[in-house]
Amino acid sequence: MFGEDHVQNIKNIRLFNSTVSRRIKDMSMDIEDTINERIKKRPFFSIQVDESTDVSDVSILLVIARYLNVNELEENLLLCYPLTERCTGEDIFNAIQGYFCENEMDWAKCCGVCTDGGKSVWLL
């Protein structure tokens, strides 16, 4: 499409084994930072919390955040965290609390918490 000169120039670009994974990680961190900044700038947000078990029998905590962004309701995955030891309500809360502290998010702006009614999640 571009000709042999361009093909040769592209072949001369050195890529390390970790280049693609590093770029994917950089992009995901940028998306996470953008979502967190949007949430912090809004007067309120809500979260939906679900705990599930994946195919390798590891419990996964999923937290979805809902917030207004430019007068539209936006919904994004905020947290996907493996719960390696136990799955009590306290463990789930501590995982979310740790994320909020690490990212300087304010619980006072959280206007709602939705769960699926599971025993461990219900104790939040």
Image (cartoon, rainbow, N blue to C red):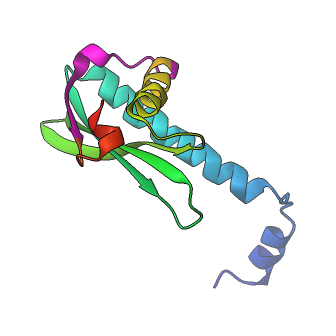
The answer to which of 11 and 105 lies nearer the viewer is 105
Whether residue 110 appears in magenta in the rendering, the answer is yes
Q: Position of residue 114 (x, y in %)?
A: 21, 39
- In this rendering, is residue 77 above or below 8? above
Q: Position of residue 31 (x, y in %)?
A: 47, 42
Asked whether the viewer can see residue 64, the reply is no
User: Which residue lies most toward the left here?
Assistant: 71
Give the residue at x 47% y 33%: 33
Q: Is residue 32 left or right of residue 74?
A: right
Q: Position of residue 61 (x, y in %)?
A: 44, 45
* Quarter in which the C terminus is drawn: top left
Quadrant in the picture for residue 113:
top left
Q: Is residue 13 left or right of residue 100?
A: right
Quadrant in the picture for residue 79:
top left
Q: Magenta part of the protein: which range?
A: 102-114
Q: Is residue 76 left or right of residue 8?
A: left
